[in-house]
Amino acid sequence: MLYQNIINELNSYFQDIADSHNLIVRYDNDLRTTPISGIWYECKIEFDRTEQKEIAPNSYRVIGNLIVEIYYSIKIGISFILRQVDILIAYFTETTVNNFLKFKTPIVQNIGRVEDNFQINIICPFYVDN
């Protein structure tokens, strides 16, 4: 599994979720302007490391994080955002996508105020075995 395939699969999976919930999402290298108010999401992918697997010769595991950054204006209450967090976490908790992309338990980080907005991150650890 090439890294580009993993990135495409992760972005496609998150975009399907975003479409079903009418979320405004920006991805890495997205040229769209950041929204001024409301709620928007940024989806980032970080690869941690690749490690040899002991199951079979010439096999390895790719490990990384899908990071969903949620930005929301000060006028929106935290309780609404936390409901959004709960909805998204359900999609990424111990989930397998297309029989190869496996998510572990997400971590929620309350970043707090960033300029005129607040930010909460959902870090979704994943791995792919090859």
Image (tube, rainbow, N blue to C red):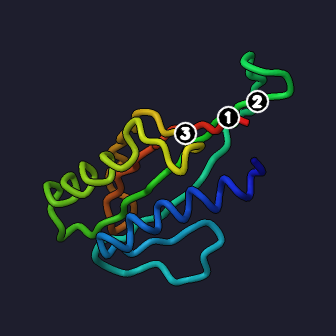
Dots 2, 1 in contact, CB < 8 A:
yes
Marked residue nearer the N-terminal end (2 or 3)? 2
Quadrant where the image shows the C terminus: top right
| Type of the residue with mark 1 | Asp
The structure residue drawn at horizontal position 18% and vertical position 71%, both measured from the top left corner, is 75
Residue at the spot of label 2? 60
Front-most of residues 50 and 54 = 54
Mark 3 — residue?
A: 126
Which element is circle 3 on? strand
Residue 121 lies, in percent from the top left, at 40, 49
Asked if the residues shown at circle 2 and circle 3 are in contact, with their CB atoms under 8 angstroms apart, the answer is no
Q: Quadrant of residue 50?
A: top right
Question: Which residue lies most toward the right here?
Answer: 58
Q: Is residue 81 left or right of residue 69?
A: left
Give whichever of 5, 35 is nearer the camera: 5
The residue tagged with tag 1: helix, strand or loop?
strand
Picture layout, residue 67 above or below residue 51: below
Q: Position of residue 37 (x, y in %)?
A: 31, 79
Q: Residues within 10 Å of mark 1 (few under 14, many from 20)?
A: some
In this view, the residue farthest toward the top is: 54
Mark 2 / mark 1, whichever is N-terminal: 2
Badge 3 amino acid: Phe
Local crowd size for mark 2, using a 10 Å CA cut-off: few (<14), some (14–19), many (≥20) = some
Name the residue that disc number 1 marks.
129
Q: Quadrant of residue 118?
A: bottom left
Q: Nearer the viewer, residue 85 or 130?
A: 130
Q: Residue 56, how many percent across, how many down?
A: 78, 21
Q: Nearer the viewer, mark 1 or mark 3?
A: 1
**Nearer to us in this view, 112 or 128:** 128
